[in-house]
Image (cartoon, helix red, strand yellow):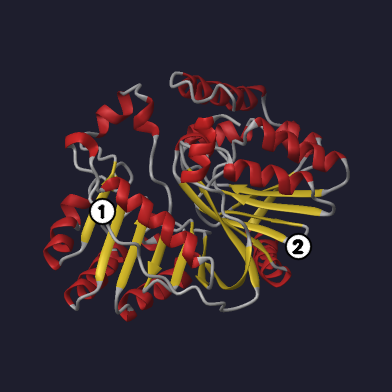
Amino acid sequence: MSLRRRLLNALHPAQPVSGGNSLSLLCNGDAYFPALLTAINQATSTIRLETYLYADDAIGHAVTAALCAAAIRGVDVRLVVDGFGARNIDLHHLPRLTQAGVQVRVYRPEHHLWRHLLSRKRSRLRRMHRKMALFDGGTAFIGGINILDDATDNPSPTRLDFAVQIRGPLVQPIAQAIDRQWQTLSRRPLFHRSIKHAPTPTKTAPSGHIRAGLLLRNNLSQRRSIENAYVQAIQTAHDHITLAMAYFIPSRNILNALLSASERGVKVRLLLQGKIEYRLQHYASQSLYRSLLNAGIRLYEYQPGFMHAKVGVIDGRWATLGSANLDPFSLLVAQEANIVIEDDAFCAQLEAKLQQEIETHSQEITAAAWGKKSSLHRALRVMSARVLFRLLSLTRYADNY
């Protein structure tokens, strides 16, 4: 192992799975936001929040009001948002937050959207896509849910998404990850010297029996951590695999692992986006349908509304949940945060929810039906995939994807 690699591993070590945790599965904003707002309102010492989107809507303003109230009563409140996903926060929330004493950092600010879209600089694609929160050093949240009101953003009634509330030893690496992010964003421009911040105090006493671990993706030593976790779990699957993924354009390693699993008799099911949110990504994902169906993988498209889930369950013993999609954005350039769970009861609960969505809110795509699609329909999907990867190749990120 090279000296550079050893140094990177020392700075950003992989987090092992450990026991003693309690996890509460939260499905959709209807469950997540009441829990999040309760945690904010009950916090007495520290609040740490990271999010990609921070919308100008009812949820955004409710969270802002709660954070401001916490800061006014003396809680140390830190908020990190992405400069592209939350590029309008300075118009709708920032003055109120800072006036109340909330400390705010913006990851890679983007003040001019057109410059971002036209730029070929690779650094502009690096976004902070994590969704994490920590309260009083003892209760954490991780998932795929942004600070965003589904009722106003989504024309249909339900946006399928998940988060998890955590207590126990897993809180410690979550706090460390959040603190590292804050420390990095606190660098002064001159000489890149950092303002030293004390670590967030944590409460890590065992709170349950669930084994879980934190997975982070960054552009240093943890480039492949989430991808590798998926590949390893898929390669060792014996019975069944269920993935629910908002944006599914997997790497060669993940795609080959899924195809191989199906070929050796593992039952593989994919619950994917049914409604078109981003046309290029949607069509590029559908360009894979023929090969997936030919391999015996069953495909379902979620119908009621947009799906934002990024979860997987394998053999009822291993699950993952978080911010990372199986697409080039998440696996190649963005900062992401997932957790892995090794607990039969939690896996059963998550799988039961996915089964319910498959049975009641999804349409199965069969090989026979897909084979009847027109040549133009198939060509548009293939062309979309080529365009997507051509755009990505301009930044040289797709070389090993």
Q: For the point 46% across and 45% down, which residue is it?
A: 11
Q: Position of residue 205 (x, y in %)?
A: 52, 77
- From where the camera sits, is residue 294 visible? yes
- From where the camera sits, is residue 308 visible? no
Amino acid at the residue labelled 2 = Gly
Q: Quadrant of residue 346?
A: bottom right
Amino acid at the residue labelled 1 = Lys
Q: For the point 24% across and 74% down, which residue is it?
A: 75
Mark 1: few/some/many CA within 10 Å (<14, 14-19, 20+): few
* Count of numbered marks: 2
Marks 1 and 2 in Cβ contact (< 8 Å): no
Reading the image, the residue beneath label 1 is 196
Name the quadrant of the N terminus.
top right
Between 272 and 369, the residue placed more toward the observer is 272
Q: For the point 57% across and 54% down, which residue is it?
A: 15
Reading the image, the residue beneath label 2 is 316
Q: Is residue 299 left or right of residue 50?
A: right
